[in-house]
Amino acid sequence: MSIQAYILIQTEVGKASSVANAIKLIPGVSLAEGVTGPYDVIMRAESPSMEDFGRAILSKVQAVPGITRTLTCPVTN
């Protein structure tokens, strides 16, 4: 069973578009869009395991310039 999660991202002012575009290029990411509200970008990603999710996706997301905070919400179904 694979791991799927939404990640809510806060960015520096004016960086939402560049952050979303950079995140779209990360393997395993199926969605990355700018949104309004308390978060600036929402993304969805999938990986074979939680270990792979952290190593292959989260570490790359956190390295994207302009991100100030993330919240990972695993899908439970």
Image (spheres, rainbow, N blue to C red):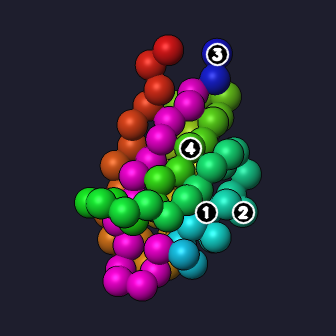
Q: Amino acid at mark 3?
A: Met
Which mark, by number, is residue 1?
A: 3
Q: Secondary structure at mark 3?
A: loop
Q: Main secondary structure of the magenta part?
A: strand
Q: Amino acid at mark 4?
A: Arg
Mark 4 or mark 3: whose residue is earlier in sequence: 3
Of residue 50 and residue 40, the one placed in the foreground of this image is 40
Q: CA distance from mark 4 to mark 1?
A: 10 Å
Looking at the image, residue 27 sits to the left or right of residue 13; the answer is right
Write the residue at 64% across / 70% down: 21
Q: Secondary structure at mark 1?
A: helix
Q: Amino acid at mark 2?
A: Leu
Q: Position of residue 17 (x, y in %)?
A: 54, 75
Q: Which residues are magenta?
A: 3-16
Confirm or deny contact between disc 2 and disc 1 (CB under 8 A).
yes
Which mark, by number, is residue 44?
A: 4
Where does label 2 land, which residue?
25
Where does label 1 land, which residue?
23
Of residue 17 and residue 70, the one placed in the foreground of this image is 17
Q: CA distance from mark 2 to mark 3?
A: 24 Å
Q: CA distance from mark 4 to mark 3?
A: 16 Å
Q: Position of residue 65 (x, y in %)?
A: 49, 78
